[in-house]
C-alpha cells in the first residue's frame, strides 16, 4: 500500500502536466492547437516576406492540426492553410470586435500578428498554444505586413498610417465614413442596433424616418411620411415630383400632375378658373380650410402626416399626439411615453403613459436564463475557459455569481452587469440589445442577436429581481 502511494505521488505531477497540455488546446478566441510536444515549432523551409512563403513555411506547418485553422472545420471559420494570406487584408476578426486580421503597414495593429507574438493578445491566448513561432518566422510576417504599405497595398485616408476599413469606426468601409458615437465598425459596416442604419453620425430607423426613408439621404417630399421605407402621401393627397399635393386645388398640378394653370388663374375643384367662388384663395389654390390638409384653419397651415383636418383643426385620427412627424399613442409608445421624446429604457415598456418594468414572474434563472447564456455566449472559447473574454464567464455553473450586482469591466466601472429589478440599468441587457454600449458591439456578435423570446425571458428575470432560482 505504501509503495503504491509513493508511485502515485511520483506520477501526480506528470499527470497534472499531461491534463493541462491536453485541455489547453482550445484558445479563448476559438483557435485550436494540438497538445504541445515541443517548446518551439520546427522550421520548414526558409520564410520570406511573401504571402506564398508565409502560407507554406509557417501556416501549413503550425496551423493545420485537427480542429485548428486547416480546411476541415477551421476554428472561428478561419482557414490559414488554403487561403493566400493577403486575402486576410482588412478582414475583421470573427471573435474580437474592433480588430482586423491584417492592417497593411501596421503589424502591431494586425490581430493575426498579435495572436502569434503578443504575450497577452486583445482576445484569447497567443497562438499556436504551447508552440511559439520561431523569431525568424514572426519577423518574416512582420516584414510582409509592413511591406504592404510601401507597395501601395493600403489606404491612408489623408493620414500617415494605413486604415483598416473593416474595423476603423472613423473610416468604416470608406474614408471619413464615421460611425455614430459608441458604435463599432464590423466588417466595414457600422454596427447599429438591428432595424437601424448609420446615417450622418446617428443610428436611424430608415423604415419610418422621412429624411432617410429606406436609405440614408432619401428625404420624402413636403407633406409625405415614411412608411415601411417608402415615402407615402396622406389620404387625399397625391405625390407629384416627390411632393404631396391636392390635385383639386394645386395650380401647378390642377387635376393631374404637371397640369399648370396660367399665371392669372387659380385651381378650383381640379380645373383652372378665374376665381375661387365660395372657397378661400390661398395663393393660386382654392381650398376649404375646414378640411384641407395643407391649409387647415387658414392658408399655409399644413397638418403633419398621419393627421386629418376636421373643423379647421389638425388632429391624429387615432386620438394620439404628434411627435416629430408621426402620430403616436403616448400611453403605449416606448419612445414617447407620456410625452414626446420620453424614451423608456432597454427592457422596459410604456404602460399608461409611464415607463414600467413588466414581468410574468415565472422565469427561472437555472432553467430559462442560464441555458440561453450557455448556448449563446460560451462557444468558441468566448465567455468560458481559463481566460474568458472580458474576464466574464457565463457557463451555467458560474453565470449567476458573475452577473448579479457585478461591475462591468467596460464603462470605467460605472455600470453593473445585472441590476435586480432594472433591465434598463443592466449592462447585460444593453449589450444584448446593442443600445448604450460603452465599447464593442451587440452581443452575441452584431447581426446575430438573441431572438426576441429569449430577450424577453432574460428581461423578465431581471425585472422580477434577478433571483437565483
Image (cartoon, rainbow, N blue to C red):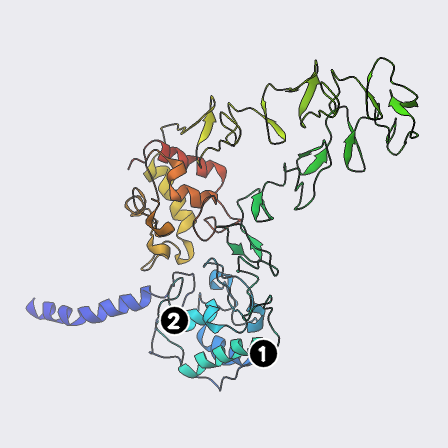
Query: Is 187 drawn above or below residue 320 in the view shown?
Result: below
Question: Which sits in the foreground, 182 or 133?
Answer: 182
- Locate residue 312, reporting x and y percent: 70, 16
Task: Provide the secondary structure element on which disc 2 rests.
Answer: loop
Task: Indicate which label's residue lies in the foreground, 2 or 1.
Answer: 1
Relative to residue 291, is residue 18 drawn left or right?
left
Q: Which residue is mark 2?
A: 118
Q: Decide: few, some or many residues near mark 1? Use Cα within 10 Å; few <14, some 14-19, many ≥20.
A: few
Q: Quadrant of residue 320?
A: top right
Task: Provide the secondary structure element on which disc 1 rests.
Answer: helix
Q: Which residue is mark 1?
A: 150
- Locate residue 250, reporting x and y percent: 83, 27
Q: Quadrant of residue 248?
A: top right
First in sequence, mark 2 or 1: give its number.
2
Q: Residue at x 40, y 78 (%)?
A: 133
Q: Residue at x 47, y 42 (%)?
A: 433
Say whether residue 104 is visible. yes
- Locate residue 219, reporting x and y percent: 70, 41
- Give the Cα separation between the discs numbered 2 and 1: 24 Å
Counting the numbered discs, the total is 2
Say whether residue 84 is visible. no
Q: Residue furthest left?
A: 2
Query: Is 298 drawn above or below residue 380 in the view shown?
Result: above
Amino acid at each position: 500500500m505504501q509503495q503504491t502511494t509513493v508511485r502515485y505521488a511520483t506520477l501526480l505531477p506528470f499527470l497534472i502536466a499531461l491534463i493541462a497540455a491536453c485541455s489547453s488546446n482550445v484558445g479563448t478566441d476559438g483557435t485550436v492547437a494540438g497538445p504541445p510536444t515541443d517548446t518551439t515549432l520546427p522550421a520548414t523551409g526558409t520564410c520570406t516576406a511573401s504571402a506564398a512563403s508565409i502560407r507554406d513555411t509557417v501556416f501549413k506547418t503550425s496551423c493545420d492540426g485537427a480542429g485548428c485553422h486547416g480546411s476541415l472545420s477551421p476554428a472561428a471559420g478561419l482557414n490559414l492553410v488554403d487561403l493566400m494570406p493577403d486575402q486576410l487584408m482588412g478582414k475583421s476578426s470573427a471573435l474580437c470586435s474592433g480588430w482586423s486580421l491584417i492592417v497593411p503597414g501596421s503589424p502591431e495593429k494586425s490581430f493575426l500578428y498579435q495572436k502569434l507574438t503578443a504575450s497577452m493578445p486583445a482576445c484569447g491566448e497567443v497562438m499556436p498554444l504551447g508552440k511559439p513561432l520561431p523569431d525568424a518566422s514572426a519577423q518574416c510576417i512582420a516584414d510582409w505586413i509592413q511591406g504592404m504599405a510601401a507597395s501601395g497595398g493600403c489606404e491612408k485616408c489623408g493620414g500617415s498610417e494605413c486604415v483598416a476599413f473593416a474595423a476603423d469606426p472613423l473610416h468604416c468601409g470608406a474614408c471619413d465614413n464615421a460611425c455614430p458615437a459608441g458604435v463599432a465598425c464590423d466588417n466595414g459596416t457600422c454596427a447599429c442596433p438591428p432595424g437601424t442604419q448609420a446615417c450622418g453620425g446617428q443610428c436611424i430607423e430608415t423604415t419610418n424616418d422621412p429624411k432617410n426613408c429606406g436609405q440614408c439621404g432619401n428625404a420624402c417630399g413636403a407633406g409625405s411620411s415614411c412608411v415601411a421605407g417608402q415615402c407615402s402621401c396622406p389620404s387625399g393627397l397625391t405625390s407629384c415630383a416627390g411632393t404631396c399635393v391636392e390635385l383639386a386645388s394645386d395650380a401647378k398640378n390642377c387635376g393631374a400632375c404637371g397640369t399648370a394653370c396660367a399665371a392669372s388663374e387659380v385651381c378650383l375643384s381640379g380645373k383652372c378658373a378665374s376665381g375661387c367662388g365660395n372657397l378661400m384663395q390661398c395663393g393660386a389654390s382654392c381650398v376649404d380650410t375646414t378640411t384641407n390638409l395643407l391649409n387647415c384653419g387658414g392658408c399655409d397651415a399644413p397638418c403633419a402626416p398621419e393627421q386629418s383636418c376636421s373643423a379647421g383643426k389638425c388632429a391624429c385620427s387615432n386620438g394620439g399626439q404628434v411627435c416629430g412627424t408621426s402620430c403616436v399613442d403616448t400611453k403605449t409608445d416606448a419612445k414617447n411615453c407620456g410625452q414626446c421624446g420620453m424614451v423608456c429604457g432597454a427592457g422596459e415598456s410604456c404602460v399608461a403613459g409611464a415607463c414600467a418594468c413588466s414581468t410574468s414572474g415565472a422565469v427561472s434563472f437555472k432553467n430559462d436564463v442560464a441555458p440561453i447564456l450557455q448556448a449563446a455566449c460560451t462557444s468558441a472559447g468566448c465567455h468560458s475557459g481559463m481566460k474568458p473574454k472580458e474576464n466574464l464567464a457565463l457557463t451555467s455553473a458560474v453565470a449567476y455569481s458573475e452577473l448579479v450586482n457585478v461591475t462591468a469591466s467596460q464603462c470605467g466601472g460605472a455600470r453593473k452587469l445585472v441590476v435586480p429589478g432594472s433591465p434598463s440599468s443592466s449592462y447585460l441587457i444593453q449589450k444584448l440589445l446593442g443600445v448604450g454600449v460603452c465599447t464593442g458591439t451587440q452581443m452575441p456578435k452584431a447581426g446575430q442577436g438573441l431572438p426576441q423570446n429569449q430577450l424577453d425571458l432574460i428581461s423578465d428575470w431581471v425585472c422580477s429581481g434577478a433571483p437565483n432560482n
